[in-house]
Image (tube, grey):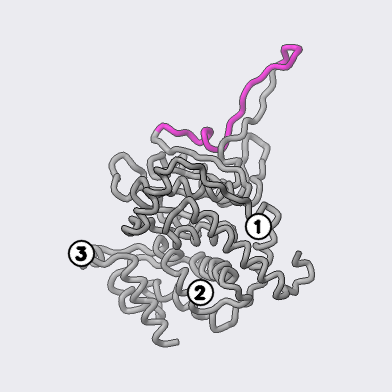
């Protein structure tokens, strides 16, 4: 589709229409939550993973299951519990006998061998089990004994965590959080959206969904995104934004010096560009803009900064601090 490197208006228009179609089909099931839907699609096309945080009952599980139907992808769900073992995720060796009674070992793939994997309440599992999933996320492979198995592309892990139940949980370390492309906050629906949710879910009729894309078309979209033009000043904006979150550096913002203990790693700058490119494609453009970067910045950076005690004492959050940093940089550009 894009072997010639030149992307004409027809290809751009087709890609934008397909992405809009995916959002439209998901919206038949998931009412409201536009930012959440867009964020998950962006992570899928950008080749990253997403962490969703929100109270139960806001449609996080339904979102990924619906996305699998619309894109004709294999879906699996892993309910994380304290007794979950790594083998329950990646798979394990099982003993089996042939017709002659000879015994041999065979690898039985776990639920991680899917295109869309829901890691429900990931912070309820032990660090050892969390690490097993995060290794698969990073390497896109699973090793059992001396054999390495590749995970099929596309591969997206959508992990969820409940912000209100902290007893008996194992919060993800910052180094592991950094491996998620985005962290998206799932909020309560508005009165209008809640009314629509009740109408849709209590009607009893099956909602028909059409398949908009397949694995091959997703791969084509990823190729197109690699050709989205990033102008030097836009890249500089993304870099300045990340460096402004790093205390102890000349580029640190004043709010950073006061409230941030550790800032974003270089992965933050990479994620801003990759996610911004997908957003630009959604908007029908082949160039990345500063507005694209600024729009994805909160979801990309909120889990990459660690606040100090003064921030908590003064009632500051990652959201308020990032907004002040964004406002300060935008005013100078």
The residue range painted magenta reads 83-102
Task: Pick the quarter of the image with the C terminus.
Answer: bottom left
The numbered dot on residue 159 is: none
Residue corresponding to mark 3: 313
Query: Would you say residue 201 sits in the magenta stretch?
Result: no
Residue at image location 40% in from the left, 72% down from the top: 246
Task: Pick the quarter of the image with the N terminus.
Answer: bottom right
The numbered dot on residue 292 is: 2
**Marks 3/1: CA–CA distance:** 45 Å
Residue at image location 40% in from the left, 80% down from the top: 250
How many numbered badges does the structure rendering display? 3
Residue corresponding to mark 1: 218
Residues at circles 2 and 3 in contact by the CB criterion of under 8 Å: no
| 81 w.r.t. 221: above or below | above
**Marks 2/3: CA–CA distance:** 32 Å
User: Which residue reaches farthest left?
Assistant: 313
| 99 w.r.t. 53: above or below | above
Residue at image location 61% in from the left, 28% down from the top: 93
Residue neighbourhood size for the residue with mark 1, other residues' Cα within 10 Å, grouped as few (<14), some (14–19), many (≥20): some
């Amino acid at each position: 589709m894009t072997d010639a490197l030149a992307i004409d208006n027809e290809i751009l228009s087709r890609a934008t229409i397909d992405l809009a179609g995916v959002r439209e089909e998901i919206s038949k099931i998931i009412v409201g939550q536009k930012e959440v839907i867009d964020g998950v699609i962006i992570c899928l096309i950008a080749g990253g993973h997403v962490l969703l945080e929100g109270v139960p009952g806001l449609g996080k599980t339904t979102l990924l299951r619906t996305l699998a139907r619309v894109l004709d992808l294999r879906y699996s769900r892993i309910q994380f519990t304290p007794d979950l073992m790594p083998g329950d995720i990646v798979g394990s060796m099982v003993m089996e006998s042939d017709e002659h009674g000879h015994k041999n070992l065979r690898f039985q793939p776990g639920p991680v061998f899917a295109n869309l994997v829901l890691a429900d309440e990931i912070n309820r599992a032990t660090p050892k089990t969390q690490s097993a999933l995060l290794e698969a996320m990073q390497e896109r492979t699973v090793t059992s004994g001396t054999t390495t198995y590749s995970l099929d592309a596309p591969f997206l892990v959508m992990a969820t965590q409940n912000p209100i139940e902290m007893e008996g949980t194992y919060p993800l370390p910052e180094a592991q959080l950094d491996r998620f492309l985005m962290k998206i906050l799932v909020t309560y629906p508005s009165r209008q959206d809640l009314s629509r949710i009740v109408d849709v879910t209590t009607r009893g009729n099956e909602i028909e969904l059409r398949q908009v894309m397949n694995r091959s078309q997703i791969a084509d979209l990823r190729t197109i995104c690699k050709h989205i033009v990033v102008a030097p000043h836009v890249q500089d904006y993304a870099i300045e934004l990340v460096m402004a979150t790093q205390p102890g550096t000349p580029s640190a913002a004043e709010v950073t010096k006061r409230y941030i203990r550790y800032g974003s790693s270089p992965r933050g700058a990479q994620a801003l560009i990759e996610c911004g490119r997908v957003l630009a494609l959604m908007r029908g453009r082949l160039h990345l803009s500063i507005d694209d970067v600024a729009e994805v910045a909160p979801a990309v950076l909120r889990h990459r900064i660690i606040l100090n005690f003064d921030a908590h004492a003064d009632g500051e959050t990652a959201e308020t601090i990032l907004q002040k940093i964004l406002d300060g940089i935008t005013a100078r550009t």
